[in-house]
Image (tube, rainbow, N blue to C red):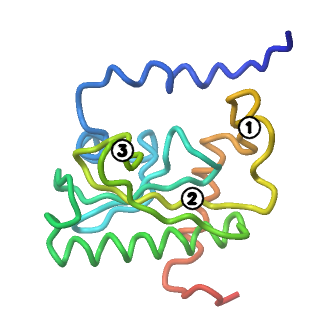
């Protein structure tokens, strides 16, 4: 039997024991780079997913601990969607994906891993990014290290401040 060593996955395997809410705890911690927070707004923030589906997988959430879209204020909803738009723009600049999945999973049955704090996933996709590894080996191959992805997205964010998508 062949072995694919992935020691960085131990964080994911052992993450289930956490008592708090990452969308509440991480912004309060004050260590944005360590916690993969890319951008803060007044009512919400954007962070890199530590256990991504693809390199560059972002999550956008309100600071307020809210479990359903219906409980968001209009201002929170607007800022979250503006952060999603910004996430799309920096992913486009940094990685040039062929497409994006942007979605919200409400409830465990719908796929939410964290059910009591609403958040939006922004996942870059490339032609051919699905292969046999997840199907046959239950393993996802990530082409970019998490910290390298964070650095690329931080640079794209800094380079794009004050610019609109398409201003090259």
Residue 39, position in %: x, y? 40, 62
**Which residue carries the number 2 mark?**
123
User: What is the secondary structure assignment of the residue under circle 1?
Assistant: loop
Name the quadrant of the C terminus: bottom right
Q: Is residue 26 left or right of residue 141?
A: left
Instruction: Work out how far the residue at label 3 is from the one at label 1, CA to CA, in angstroms.
Output: 26 Å
Residue 2, position in %: x, y? 85, 14
Name the quadrant of the N terminus: top right
**Which residue carries the number 3 mark?**
109
- Sequence-wise first label, 2 or 1: 2
Instruction: Work out how far the residue at label 2 is from the one at label 1, CA to CA, in angstroms.
Output: 15 Å
Residue 115, position in %: x, y? 28, 44
Farthest residue to the top: give it: 1
User: What is the secondary structure assignment of the residue under circle 2?
Assistant: strand
Q: Residue at x 25, y 39 (%)?
A: 25
Residue 141's tag is 1
User: What is the secondary structure assignment of the residue under circle 3?
Assistant: helix
Mark 2 or 3, closer to the camera: 3
**Towards the viewer: 44 or 100:** 100
């Amino acid at each position: 039997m062949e072995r694919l060593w992935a020691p960085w996955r131990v964080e994911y395997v052992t993450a289930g024991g956490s008592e708090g809410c990452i969308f509440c705890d991480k912004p309060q911690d004050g260590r944005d780079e360590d916690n993969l927070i890319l951008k803060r707004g007044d009512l919400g923030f954007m962070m890199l997913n530590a256990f991504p589906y693809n390199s560059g997988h972002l999550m956008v959430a309100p600071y307020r601990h809210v479990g359903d879209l219906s409980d968001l204020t209009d201002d929170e909803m607007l800022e979250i969607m503006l952060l999603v738009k910004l996430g799309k723009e920096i992913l486009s600049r940094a990685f040039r994906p062929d497409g994006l999945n942007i979605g919200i999973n409400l409830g465990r049955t719908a796929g939410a891993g964290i059910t009591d704090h609403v958040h939006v996933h922004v996942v870059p996709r490339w032609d051919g990014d699905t292969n046999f590894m997840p199907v046959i080996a239950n393993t996802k191959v990530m082409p970019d290290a998490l910290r390298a992805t964070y650095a690329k997205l931080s640079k794209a964010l800094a380079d794009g401040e004050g610019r609109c998508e398409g201003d090259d």
